[in-house]
Image (cartoon, helix red, strand yellow):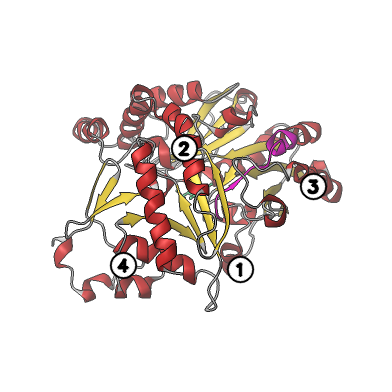
Amino acid sequence: MSQSVLAPNDLEAYWMPFTANRAFKSAPRMVGRAKDMHYFTPDGRKLIDAAAGLWCVNAGHSRDPIVKAIQDQAAELDFSPPFQFGHPKAFQLATRLADLAPGDLDHVFFANSGSEAVDTALKIAIAFHNVSGQGSRQRLIGRVRGYHGVGFGGISVGGMVANRKFFGSALPADHLPATYNRAEQAFSRGEPEWGGHLADELENIVALHDASTIAAVIVEPMAGSTGALPAPKGYLQKLRQICDKHGLLLIFDEVITGFGRLGHAFAAERYGVVPDMITFAKGVTSGTVPMGGVIVRKHIYDAFMKGPEQAVELFHGYTYSAHPLACAAALATLDVYEKEHLFENARKLENTLADAVHSLRGLPNVEDIRNVGMVGAIDLAPKAEGPGKRGFDAMNEAFHKQDMLIRVAGDTIAISPPLILNENHIAEIIDKVGRTIRAIA
Ligand code: PLP
């Protein structure tokens, strides 16, 4: 059945994720095809993709070398059991990722999504302390307004209220305060000057629980899903110092910030901080095939490599860890990033995007604007009907009337285009965002 002949009842069976199902089904935002910077609706309308799909299509859509790599791989080796067996591309990809990561982050554990990557990292943190003779270190520290996916580990450390109120917190966790403060930071360009001191709150958390009960701290270098909140200047460096002081593992959740979004392979490089683990997903395959994973420092891997040689060292893994299609897609994607200098392109265009997005200041209902790397965010004032309605209207207006796909988080418009973009794409996106904001005023 072609998408263009879907009847209203055909939409019923699919329970859509993180979606207002009834509103979608009464006025669908359907896409049928994509190429480079654009989506196409089933009836042929061309939309500029201002969101890289969902923060993931960093190499642009349906790129020939990536498509071919996936097709060839499906024909050559469809599946390889990841437990006790291997296939060459898994090892090649792990080596490539270890080379991209800073410092001695040099071993890679594969999963299939950001949520699985996060839960894997949290489990490795707890198990690391166990095998190191510090089994009382079980507590995990996240941050208010953090998002770490939807697994029970991820929602325990996450600081997104809707995720927590429905499902609770399964693991012992505590939270650093959010780094966003509009009164102090409104209309900051790049990393805000104010807020580095908020990392000191980790000392208070350690004082409350005692370091001997804490396994790890997990933060996004830029909180993406709760409205694109760049880390304040000095914040991540300070977290690193406090974690070192108390023997806590520091995890950077780079599911969004990895693979060029902040102008480098990983944001860790931008900030000159080497965390103990990096979680990744999304951009590793440019969104083409699900994949996620964790890059860990050498001492963490080494801590597990003891005991009888025939014994499994870490009781963890997924049937689809290092799936051949995902590995082929990731290797081809990394080639595109390298050959086309896409991380450099993101760095080169950062100021252009900053100027463009901040030019929207003064438009109706614009309360704050932020930017970092290839990310821009515009906070709109909530409507009288309640939080989220104006953001929802913006997404609909952009899709149906302005030929643009945007991501909204509540009443915040988030801009995160594919990294193949040029100045003209930035101008078009910002022009359309401006039109959208005016249209829904
Ligand atoms: N961690 C971060 C920082 C994310 O932004 C996301 C998703 O947006 C996730 C984890 C979860 O990834 P997934 O949806 O692939 O499970």
Tell me the magenta residue range: 227-239
- Which residue lies under the disc numbered 1? 165
The single residue placed furthest to the bottom in the displayed view is 385
- Which residue lies under the disc numbered 4? 14
For badge 3, the amino acid type reads Glu
Q: Quadrant of the N terminus?
A: bottom left
Say which mark, if any, is on residue 201: 3
Few, some or many residues within 10 Å of mark 3 (<14, 14–19, 20+): some
Spatial separation of the CA atoms under disc 4 and disc 3: 43 Å
Marked residue nearer the N-terminal end (3 or 1): 1
Name the residue nearer the viewer: 30 or 212.
30
49 inside magenta stretch:
no
> For residue 302, what is the image quadrant?
top right
Image x and y of residue 184, in percent: 72, 52
Spatial separation of the CA atoms under disc 3 and disc 1: 24 Å
* In the image: residue 326, left or right of residue 370: left
Spatial separation of the CA atoms under disc 1 and disc 4: 24 Å
